[in-house]
Image (cartoon, grey):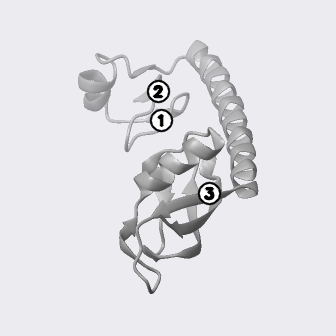
C-alpha cells in the first residue's frame, strides 16, 4: 500500500515521502496515529509541497549551522582548570565544561551531545574539539586550557 508520510518515521521514511508499506502496518499503525495518509493524486501534490518546504528548511538550517561554525572558528575558548606542577590536570575537561565556556565567552549555545572530544583533555595547552551541527555541518572549537 502506498502512503504519504506526514511525519518522520524511523525505518520507513521522512515527512513528505511516498513509501510502499504493508497494508497491516499502514492500517494498524501509520493511519490511526496520523503519521501517514493514503497516497492519492491530491496527496502526491501535497507530498511535493511538503518535500519542498522540508528542503527549504534544511537549507536554512545548514546555512545557519555554517555561520555558527565560522563564528566558533574565530574564537579561542579559554578554560581554567586545576593543574599540577607538570601541566597535568586534576581530572579532565568534559563536554559540559566546553559548552559552559562557549556560552559564557561567545553567547552561543552548543549542544553537549554534539561536542566530540577525540582524546581526553588532561593537560594544559591548546586543544581542538569538533562540534556536529544540524545539516551535517561539522565545526571546530579551539580551546586553550590554562591553570587556575
Quarter-wise, where is residue 88 in the image?
bottom left
Task: List the residue tagged with mark 3.
Answer: 77
Quadrant of image for the N terminus: top left
Vertical relation: 40 (above or below) 98? above
Q: Nearer the viewer, mark 3 or mark 2?
A: 3
**Image-based side of 19 in relation to 143, left or right:** left
Which of label 3 and label 1 is nearer to you?
A: 3
Q: Is residue 31 left or right of residue 120?
A: left
> Which residue corresponds to mark 2?
5
Point out residue 144 in the picture as x, y percentages from the top left corner. 60, 67
Looking at the rendered image, the disc whose residue lies closer to the viewer, 1 or 2, is 2
* Residue in the foreground of this view, choosing between 100 and 111: 100
The residue under the point 49% across, 55% down is: 98
Which residue shows up at 43% across the image and 83% down it?
85
- Kindly identify the residue that appears in the image at 56 percent across and 54 percent down: 132
Distance from the alpha carbon under mark 3 to that under mark 1: 46 Å
Q: Earlier in the sequence, mark 3 or mark 2?
A: 2
Q: CA distance from mark 3 to mark 2?
A: 43 Å
Q: Residue at x 47, y 27 (%)?
A: 5
Identify the residue position indicated by label 1 in the image. Answer: 19
Crowding at dot 2, Cα within 10 Å, few <14 / some 14-19 / many 20+, comes out as many
User: Pointers 3 and 1 in contact (CB under 8 A)?
Assistant: no
Contact between marks 1 and 2 (CB within 8 A): the answer is yes
Spatial CA distance of label 1 from label 2 is 8 Å
Please tell me whether mark 3 sits on a helix, a strand or a loop.
strand
Q: Earlier in the sequence, mark 3 or mark 1?
A: 1
Secondary structure of the residue carrying numbered label 2: strand
Amino acid at each position: 500500500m502506498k502512503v504519504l508520510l506526514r511525519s518522520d518515521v524511523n525505518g520507513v521514511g521522512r515527512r513528505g515521502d511516498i513509501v510502499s508499506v504493508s497494508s497491516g502496518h499502514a492500517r494498524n499503525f501509520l493511519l490511526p496515529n496520523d503519521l501517514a495518509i493514503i497516497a492519492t493524486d491530491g496527496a502526491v501534490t501535497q507530498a511535493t509541497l511538503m518535500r519542498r518546504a522540508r528542503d527549504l528548511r534544511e537549507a536554512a538550517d545548514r546555512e545557519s549551522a555554517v555561520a555558527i561554525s565560522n563564528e566558533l572558528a574565530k574564537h579561542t575558548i579559554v578554560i581554567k582548570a586545576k593543574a599540577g606542577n607538570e601541566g597535568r590536570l586534576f581530572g579532565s575537561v568534559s563536554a559540559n565544561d566546553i559548552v559552559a565556556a562557549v556560552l559564557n565567552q561567545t553567547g552561543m549555545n552548543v549542544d553537549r551531545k554534539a561536542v566530540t572530544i577525540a582524546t581526553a583533555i588532561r593537560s594544559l595547552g591548546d586543544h581542538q574539539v569538533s562540534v556536529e551541527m544540524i545539516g551535517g555541518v561539522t565545526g571546530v572549537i579551539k580551546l586553550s586550557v590554562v591553570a587556575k
